[in-house]
Amino acid sequence: MNTNNIDNNKPTDTQKQSEELSNKKKPTKRIRKQATEEQLNNPFHGVKLVQVLERLVAYYGWEYLGDRVNIRCFIYNPTMKSSLGFLRRTAWAREHVEDLYLEMLDEKEDRSKENDEKAN
C-alpha cells in the first residue's frame, strides 16, 4: 500500500480545485429585457424559421410554394429538413419565404375581418 501521499491534514489537488471553484462568485441571474412595442408588432418576433415554413406548408402546400418561390427543395421531393437547410444558408430564398409568410398573414387577417362583417 502506497502511504507516501496520505496525509489527512493536507488537502489533495482535487479538493483545492473544488475549493477554488466554490470560492469564485457565482454568476448572477440574467435579467431579461422587456420586448419593445416595435418588437411586439413585428410578425416574426418569437417565430422560428421552422414554424414559418410549417405554417406556409399547412396553408398553401408544397406545390404552391414551389410555384411562388422557385427553389428545387420545394419542387422536387420537398422535405422540411432540406428546405430548412437551404433557407438557412441562402438569404434571398429566406427573404422570399418571409415575404410569402407576410402575405399569408395579411390574407388570414382579411378573411377574419370578412367573417366578422358577415357575422354582424
Image: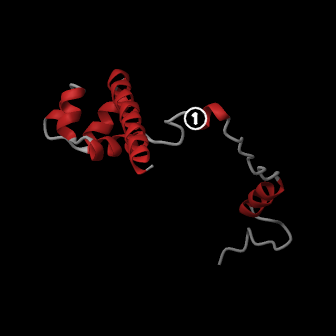
Residue 80 on image: x %, y %: 27, 44
119 and 64: which one is in front? 119
**The N terminus lies in quadrant:** bottom right
Q: Is residue 70 left or right of residue 115?
A: left
Work out whether residue 73 can be spotted: no
Q: Is residue 118 left or right of residue 4?
A: left
Extreme-left residue of the structure: 76
Residue 60 on image: x %, y %: 25, 40
Q: Residue at x 32, y 25 (%)?
A: 93
Q: Is residue 23 above or below residue 118?
A: below
Residue holding disc 1: 41
Q: Residue type at mark 1? A: Asn
Q: Is residue 60 left or right of residue 120?
A: left
Residue 98, quarter of picture: top left
Residue 5, quarter of picture: bottom right
Residue 20 on image: x %, y %: 80, 55
Q: Is residue 6 left or right of residue 93?
A: right
